[in-house]
Every structure is written in C-alpha cells, then in structure tokens.
Image (tube, grey):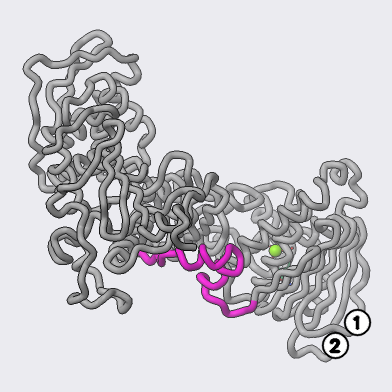
C-alpha cells in the first residue's frame, strides 16, 4: 500500500517542518487514524504531549510491508503522481509526518490489519528504524511518540509549559472532533473528554461548548455555483469578544482565512455591536481542484481559485441562516416574554416587540412566508397589547431614550438607533425598488479630503448615485455633495463623506455590489441621525409606527440594540414583591 514518492512529486510539495510542537504530532497522528477509517480514536497525552502522545485507533491497520516503510521519508499510500496534487482529498498527503516524527523522538507503531492473524510493531529512535517484529495487537493501530525532540535540544527548549502545549493539543483535537462528529474520541490529558461516535454536529457542539450554544445554533445549508456551505451558526446573543470560536473548514480541513471571516462578520453586521464576534461552525465544500491546500505546511491556510464565489456563498449562507432567527424571535414574542435575569450582563433583547401592532399578517411581512412552528400559539390567542397602538404613553428621557409601557412590562427605546434602523430599511427598500427619492441641495456642500480618499470616492460615483448620494468632483482636493436620499434628515456632509470613504476602504474589493450598497446606506443613516436631536412628539409617534413594520427591529444597522425590554416579573423581583 505504501510507496516511495518519486522525487519530482516531493519537489512540488511545500517544504517545511511537519513537527513543530506536540500539537502537530497529535494532528498528524489523528488525521492518519481518520484516513484509516477509524470509528474510535483514543488520544493520550502526558506532560502536554511533551513526554508522550499515544493515539490508538480501530482503523484498517498496517501490514508488515506498510510498517517497513512507515518511518521512511516521503512514503505514503495516498498520492501517486503529480496529477493527484490537484485533487487532494484525504487529510494526509505528504508522506513525511511519521518519518519526521520518528527522526526526533522515540516512536513506536503497533498495528494489525483486520484479516491478519497477528500484529506487528516497528520502532524508531532518533531516526534509527528497527526491524519489523511480530507483536500481539488488537485490530487497528497504536502510535506512541515519547520524548519529542529528545535528540534536538534546541527545539526542546522552545516547547511551552505542559499546560501551554496541552492547550494547543486540545484546540487541534477540538477542530478534528468538530469536522468528524461521526468518529468517537476519548481524550485523556489530565481530565478525560469523551465524545461518542456517530453524533450530529449539533450534539457534538453541545458537548464541546455547552448546551446553551447548542440550543442557540441555527442550521446553515446553502449551495451556489458548486460551493456548498453547511453547518451551524450561533445566534447573535451568543456572540463573543474575540474571534476564537469561528470554526471554518474547507473540504473537511480546518482553515483560517481573513476573507471568509470577513464574509461571516459582514453577514452578522446588522446584529452585532462593534467588538463582538460571531460563533460559527461552517463547512465549505467545493471541487478540490479549485482550492489549493498546499500553500502552507501546517495546512491551515488555503487559496481559492474563485475567491469571490466562495466569499459570497459563505455570506449568503449565513444571512439565510440568521433569517430563521427573525422567525424564532417573533414566534417567542407572540407568547410570553422570556424570563430575564435582572441587572446581570447585557440585557436580553426584546422579542417581537415591534412586530405586533397590526396583526401577524401585516407586521410580520417576511415571516408570513416562513413555515409556522408547532410552538406558536394558536392564532385566536390574545396577542399582548402593542406598545405602539395609540402611542399615548411614552416618556422621553435625556432627549434620547423613549420609555414605553408594554403589555409584558416596559421597554426602553434608543430613539436614534431606532430611527437609524427605520431610515435604513426605507432606503434599502427604495434602492431595491429602484426609486430612491433624492433631495438636491440648492447650494452643494463642498468637502475637502486627502487625494487618495477623493480618488476612492470618485471611483464609486455610480454606486453612490444608485444609493441616492450625488457626489461630484469639485476640483483641487475637494468633492461636492449635490444631493442625498430624501429619507435622511439633514445629514452632516463632512461626517457623511468621511464615513463613506471609510466604508469603501473597508469593503475593498471583496464585497459584492449588494453588500456595498447596504454599507453605504447604513453609513448614510448614521450621519443623518445625530444623538441629542430632539424629536417632536408627533415625530416619535411616527417613528414608533414605522418601527412596527421593520424587518429587523432589534438592532440599528451597526448592531447596537434599538430597544431593551423588561418584564413585570423583573420589576416585582427588583422590588422584592416576588422572589
Ligand atoms: P501521509 O499521511 O501523508 O501518507 P504519514 O507519514 O502521516 O504520511 O503516514 C504514512 C503512511 O502510513 C500513510 O500513508 C498510511 O498508509 C500509513 N499510516 C499512518 N498512520 C496510520 C494509521 N493510524 N492506520 C493505518 N495506516 C496508517
Ligand atoms: Mg499523515
């Protein structure tokens, strides 16, 4: 099964060290077990993998001939000629892992194939390989790596503390467990982690990240232009302060890719505040010939032949998945408002608060098309009174917050965030319908800006015009704003143009036209709504009425919440009327 690779193939393979630290050993060994069709894999670590990594699997095992070649450089059963490099499917492909590991440790392989009468073992110590000897073994393979870098003191010194190495090993194992929920894992590294075989991705995420993450996960299923995107994305409520839980896989292999992270974050943009990052588990599948996994020896970076296609598939997939959330939120809103812990952390966002004033059909516009779930209350059930019906009772605090009595308790609306959202959806609807009303300025506003920014802006004049923003060259270092979308209230030209430039710079050339327009619109809205603007009562009523028709009422286009709601139950607990 194992053959030595011809030198021309070896030459084509990205050079580099396979073994860097214990986690690379863990990764290579477990990938080999998966490649061997294992259904259960046991990983034991001692000293964070520094003194021992032992991987035991129930895979197909290795023959005596296999064992003879296992520690030989560039011996692999998975690749035969140069052509295969274009379509790499199995996880391992360089045939150098075992040889490299065997050269810098005390290694031992014990294995038995399913139909073999007895097993065999081979050892390597600092690259010196022993004869293959018969040995008693269960079906499958045990690979034991002791004292990594025992003969390379310089490398050994660079190892982190046992806890540090252990942590990296666990991260690698987590990725492997996520991409193979069908495979059972037992990880013994101080404490034992047991992941049974044949799990769904959702269940496995529950085991690894907790029940709450599992419950908050929304299914992703998308296919476009030969690019499949599947997996789960976690509801924005479960967002984190870092990107550590963005798990992306391409053809089963964990990857890091800035452009794809951007695609994910762009899809979440409307739901998340700055500084908060989505939690996603996305599996991208595409023709292996259209992705180069061989860019980097540790194989976590990839290069796509059609980067834009993959970008937009990922972005659309996440947007579609998040749309289910609107449905879920509204569904819960029609019933009781969920119990909220008072005064701890970030308040829970209201559910369906804005959606109820005109009955399900009218106000749930988009929702009506979604299948209704079983848990939704019967249509005849009384809906909670809407805070926007009649709008007789509201109180404005600090010219900014609107306090509303609601059926379930009370709510506080950030009038500017809400206004931004209302204007934004108006603009977007007009843009999509192709009739953006433009307010022309009698006297164009002249704004000066650095030459590079000016060029960037002028490059996009057409996209800007479609958005309702009329911008022209004024000569010198200036541009002039000649008109803006009518729904904006008195935009500040400097803030508007500065913001547009920033948006254009950020989108770069990864975005699609639709994404660009959404960003320009959202930026335009922000500049149009100034905190501290005092609204007349009639304007507030107008605003609350418009809010009832919003598609995404809970966040401003930049992800800040528009409204925070509280239940009567909370009030009662705060005042100790109830426990
Ligand atoms: P590669 O995985 O790139 O082929 P490796 O050095 O990791 O290179 O492994 C060399 C060969 O040893 C593999 O091609 C495979 O045939 C065999 N092998 C390694 N680990 C296992 C295992 N756990 N079960 C069965 N065969 C294995
Ligand atoms: Mg391998």
Q: Residue at (28%, 74%) from the top-left corner? A: 376
Q: Which residues are magenta?
A: 196-222
Q: Is residue 386 above or below residue 154?
A: below
The secondary element bearing badge 2 is classed as loop
Is 198 one of the magenta-colored residues? yes
Q: Quadrant of the N terminus?
A: bottom right
Front-most of residues 103 and 201: 201
Front-most of residues 108 and 68: 108
Q: Is residue 3 above or below residue 261?
A: below
Ligand 1 within 8 A of label 1's CB? no
Please give the residue where the numbered disc 2 appears in the rendered image: 118
Front-most of residues 211 and 352: 352
Q: Badge 1: how crowded within 10 Å, few (<14), some, or many (20+)?
A: some
On residue 35, which mark appears? Answer: none
Quick one: which residue is furthest to the top in this view? Answer: 476
Q: Residue at (18%, 17%) from the top-left corner? A: 480
Q: Residue at (84%, 75%) from the top-left corner? A: 110
Q: Residue at (89%, 63%) from the top-left corner? A: 124
Q: Position of residue 362 (x, y in %)?
A: 13, 62
Mark 1–mark 2 Cα distance, whole angstroms, equals 7 Å
Please give the residue where the numbered disc 1 appears in the rendered image: 134
């Amino acid at each position: 099964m194992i053959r030595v690779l011809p030198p021309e193939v070896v030459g084509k393979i990205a050079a580099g060290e396979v073994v860097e630290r214990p986690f690379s050993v863990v990764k290579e060994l477990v990938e080999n077990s998966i490649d061997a069709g294992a259904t259960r894999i046991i990983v034991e670590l001692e000293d964070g993998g520094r003194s021992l990594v032992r991987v035991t699997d129930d895979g197909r095992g290795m023959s005596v001939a296999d064992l003879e070649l296992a520690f030989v450089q560039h011996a692999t059963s998975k690749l035969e000629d140069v052509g295969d490099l274009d379509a790499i499917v199995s996880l391992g492909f360089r045939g150098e892992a075992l040889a490299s590991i065997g050269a810098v440790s005390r290694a031992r392989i014990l294995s038995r194939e399913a139909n073999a009468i007895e097993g065999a073992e081979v050892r390597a110590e600092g690259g010196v390989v022993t004869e293959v000897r018969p040995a008693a073994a269960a079906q499958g393979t045990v690979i034991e790596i002791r004292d990594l870098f025992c003969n390379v003191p310089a490398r050994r010194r660079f190892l982190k503390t046992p806890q540090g190495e252990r942590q990296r090993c666990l991260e690698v194992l987590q990725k492997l467990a996520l991409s193979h929920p069908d495979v059972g894992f037992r990880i013994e590294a101080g404490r034992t982690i047991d992941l049974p075989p044949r799990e769904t991705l959702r269940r496995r995420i529950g085991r690894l990240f907790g029940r709450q993450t599992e419950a908050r996960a929304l299914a992703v299923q998308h296919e476009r232009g030969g690019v499949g995107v599947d997996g789960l994305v976690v509801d924005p409520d479960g967002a984190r302060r870092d990107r550590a839980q963005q798990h992306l896989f391409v053809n089963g292999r964990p990857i890091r890719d800035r452009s794809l992270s951007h695609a994910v974050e762009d899809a979440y943009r409307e739901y998340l505040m700055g500084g908060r990052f989505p939690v996603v588990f996305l599996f991208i599948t595409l023709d292996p010939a259209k992705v180069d996994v061989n860019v980097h020896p540790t194989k976590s970076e990839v290069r796509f032949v059609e980067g834009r296609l993959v970008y937009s598939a990922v972005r659309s997939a996440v947007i579609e998945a998040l749309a289910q959330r609107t449905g879920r939120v509204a569904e819960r809103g029609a019933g009781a408002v969920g119990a909220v812990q008072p005064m701890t952390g970030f308040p829970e966002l209201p559910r369906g608060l804005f959606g109820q004033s005109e009955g399900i059909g009218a106000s749930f516009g988009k929702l009506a098309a979604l299948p209704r779930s079983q848990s939704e209350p019967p249509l005849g059930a009384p809906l909670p009174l809407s805070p926007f019906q009649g709008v007789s009772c509201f109180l404005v605090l600090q010219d900014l917050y609107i306090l509303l009595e609601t059926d379930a308790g009370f709510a506080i609306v950030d009038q500017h965030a809400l206004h931004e959202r209302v204007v934004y959806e108006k603009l977007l609807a007009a843009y999509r319908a192709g009739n953006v009303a433009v307010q022309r300025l009698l006297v164009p506003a002249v704004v000066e800006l650095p030459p590079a920014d000016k060029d960037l802006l002028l490059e996009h004049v057409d996209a800007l015009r479609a958005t309702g923003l009329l911008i022209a060259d004024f000569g010198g270092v200036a541009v002039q704003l000649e008109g803006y979308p009518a729904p904006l209230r008195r935009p500040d030209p400097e803030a508007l143009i500065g913001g547009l430039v920033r948006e254009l710079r950020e989108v770069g050339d990864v975005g699609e036209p639709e994404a660009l327009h959404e960003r320009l619109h959202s930026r335009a809205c922000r500049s149009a709504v100034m905190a501290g603007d005092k609204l007349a009562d009639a304007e507030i009523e107008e605003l609350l009425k418009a809010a009832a028709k919003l598609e995404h009422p809970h966040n401003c286009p930049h992800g800040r919440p528009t409204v925070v709601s509280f239940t009567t139950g909370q009030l009662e607990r705060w005042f100790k009327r109830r426990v």
